[in-house]
Image: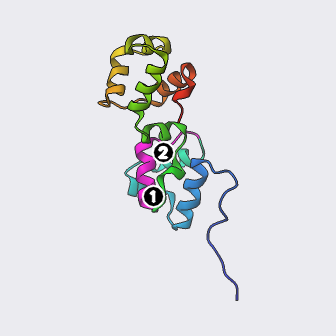
């Protein structure tokens, strides 16, 4: 008896994009089918799978739901930060430095008004600003 699988073994690299491709193939979905199910453009999914763009947090959550997998498999550092109670993490790190929000934001090169919304939980951080924060305050990384 011969068994034939349409997908390979679990990838050696456990990157979000490798896991996305693996589980999409395992579920026997085309890139077009997965993109439509997630409500994104097909070309965008191809760029995620080719590692040309990082998978945004909300899109990774949608993919995980569709593929019926643990969403952490599709998270990079930024997505893990967003999934964690990031506003509490920001406040915690800021307080360890003994800084107010304005000074903390200024040292990272970001606007105080935007930072205060993140720490207050009323707005989410962008990947770009997250990278600025990590460069200044590496302990923010989850």
Q: Can residue 63 be found in the magenta stretch?
A: yes
Q: Residue furthest left?
A: 122
Above or below for 97 versus 33: above
Name the residue at 49% across, 26% down: 128
The reply, left or right, for residue 114 in relation to residue 142 is: left
Q: What main secondary structure does the magenta stretch of the protein show?
A: helix
The residue under label 2 is 44
Name the residue at 68% across, 50% down: 13
Range shown magenta:
52-67
Query: x, y percentage for residue 38?
Result: 39, 53
Query: x, y percentage for residue 138?
Result: 57, 25
Query: x, y percentage for residue 54?
Result: 53, 40
Q: Secondary structure at mark 2?
A: helix
The circle drawn on residue 138 is: none
Above or below for 64 versus 26: above
The residue under label 1 is 34
Q: Residue furthest bottom?
A: 1
Above or below for 30 versus 124: below
- Is the residue marked by circle 1 packed among few (<14), some (14-19), or many (20+) residues within 10 Å? many
User: How far, Cα to Cα, is label 2 from label 1?
Assistant: 11 Å
Query: x, y percentage for residue 96?
Result: 48, 20
Q: Nearer the viewer, residue 58 or 93?
A: 93
Quarter-wise, where is residue 103 in the image?
A: top left
Q: Nearer the viewer, residue 20 or 73?
A: 73
Q: Is residue 115 visible?
A: yes
Quarter-wise, where is residue 3 in the image?
A: bottom right
Q: Secondary structure at mark 1?
A: helix
Q: Is residue 33 visible?
A: no
Above or below for 39 versus 93: below
The answer to whether the residues at label 2 and label 1 have Cβ atoms under 8 Å apart is: no
């Amino acid at each position: 008896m011969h068994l034939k699988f349409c997908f390979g073994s679990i990838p050696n690299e456990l990157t979000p994009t490798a896991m996305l491709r693996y589980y999409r193939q395992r579920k026997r979905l085309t890139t077009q089918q997965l993109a439509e199910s997630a409500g994104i453009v097909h070309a965008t999914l191809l760029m995620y799978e080719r590692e040309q763009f990082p998978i945004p947090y909300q899109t990774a959550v949608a993919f995980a739901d569709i593929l019926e997998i643990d969403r952490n498999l599709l998270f990079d550092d930024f997505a893990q930060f967003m999934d964690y109670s990031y506003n509490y993490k920001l406040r915690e790190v800021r307080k360890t430095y003994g800084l107010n929000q304005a000074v903390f934001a200024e040292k990272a090169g970001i606007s105080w008004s935007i930072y205060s919304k993140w720490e207050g939980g009323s707005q989410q951080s962008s990947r770009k600003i997250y990278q600025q924060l990590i460069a200044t305050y590496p302990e923010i990384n989850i």
